[in-house]
Every structure is written in structure tokens, then in C-alpha cells.
Amino acid sequence: MVLTPSTMLALGTSAPDFRLPDVVSGQEISLATFADQAALLVMFICRHCPFVKHVQNELAQLGHDYQTQPLGIVAISANDAEKYPDDAPESLKAMAIDLGFTFPLCYDETQEVAKAYTAACTPDFFVFGRDGQRPAYGHRTLVYRGQLDDSRPSNGLPVTGQDLRAALDAVLAGRPVPQEQNPSIGCNIKWKPGAEPPYFG
């Protein structure tokens, strides 16, 4: 298992747009889907990774806890499904249903969306707020990227979602998110042969 940290994309980066199918509903999801939301959480996850399995119940709980807040949430899996069939769309659909996800789970077959976000590991988290100068949905700016919390599969710490929840609560309340942020860490995204981005490895 190769442990990979977040790339820690520069704060203030605009959210890249995307168009991906939700594996459960088949609906196309894009930034426009969340146009009415004050903030957007983009999570790169998969099904087979032990780091995602370690936190998957907390991810589902986040969806329930923020369901009444003006927060859009989307999960994306970009792993090579040919080599990792647990991360194929039908398997992801079963995951989303079993865990009771209240947010779309999309499959990034081309892996281009993951590259646009410089996603590196599973799980990897990106929180975007509205750009006050450019309020249209296409101009959300990055206010948090990093870990869910300090828990890891082997360190015995409880999964609380503390870091991510603090960032979400701040941006939803209109407060600045602290810029001292710790990278997420997990299994590297399983890139297709020859499709590895420059930041991989």
C-alpha cells in the first residue's frame, strides 16, 4: 500500500467545473447542480481503500448532519475500475445505498476531474466558498483542503470529522477558515497506466 498525502492545492483556487454521472440516480452532476448552495464539499473517495472504509460512516453522517444547511456535497471516485473492480460504478452504487449517502457519488471514468482538482489520495477533501466578487456558481474559491481529522486506521484515534467540520461550520457562518491545514493521507488514486498526473509519485 502506497500512502499518499493531499497535494494541498492553493487556497483561493477556483473550483474546476465537471460533468459526471451519479452512480445511483444516473443524473448528471456539475457545479451548476449546487448553484443555490453557500458552500460546496468535494470528496474524492472509493470503495476498496482501507482509509476510506475507516471513515465511511462519518462521511455518511456528514451528509445527514448538514442536510438542512446550505451546503452542497458531492463524492467522486476516479480509480481505475478495470484493475480495482470494487471501485466500478455498480459497486460504488451499492456502497452509496448501503451507507445511506444523502449526496451524489459520481464516477470519474476519464480521471480528468481528479486531475483538475489535483486529487491525490482517498479520501481527499476540498471545501469551496462563494467568491464575493464573482458570485456565480462557476466561481467558488477553495477555503479548505486537507484531512477529515487526525484518525487513521492504525492509530486508535476516534473518527470525529473534527477538522473538516470546523472548516464547514466556519464557511457556512461566513467566518474565515484557518489557513493552517493538515493534509489528508490515504491510498493513492489508482491511475490508469500512462494517465498518471505530474504530481503523482
Image: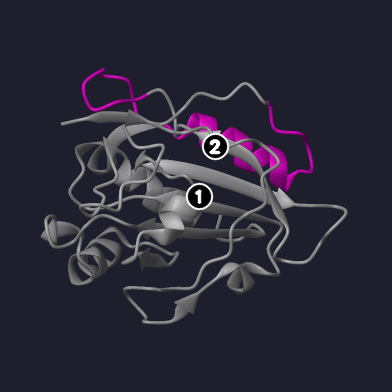
Residue, far right = 133
Residue at the (62%, 21%) spot, across then down = 180
Kind of residue at badge 1: Tyr
Left or right of 180: which side holds 77?
left
Q: Which residue is mark 1?
A: 117
Q: Earlier in the sequence, mark 2 or mark 1?
A: 1
Tell me, yes or no, whether the highlighted magenta stretch contains residue 158. Answer: yes
Residue 136, image x, y percentages: 78, 66
Left or right of 159: which side holds 131?
right
Residue 20, image x, y percentages: 43, 72
User: What range is drawn magenta here?
Assistant: 151-178
Residue at the (20%, 65%) spot, across then down = 88
Quick one: 157 or 187, which is closer to the camera?
Answer: 187
Q: Is residue 159 visible?
A: no
What crowding class fits label 1: few (fewer than 14 Cα within 10 Å), some (14-19), or many (20 or more)? many
Residue at the (37%, 43%) spot, across then down = 58
Q: Which residue is mark 2?
A: 145
Placement of 100 over or under 51, stated as above or below: below
What crowding class fits label 2: few (fewer than 14 Cα within 10 Å), some (14-19), or many (20 or more)? many
Kind of residue at badge 2: Arg
| Quarter residue 34 falls in | bottom right
Most common SS among magenta residues: loop
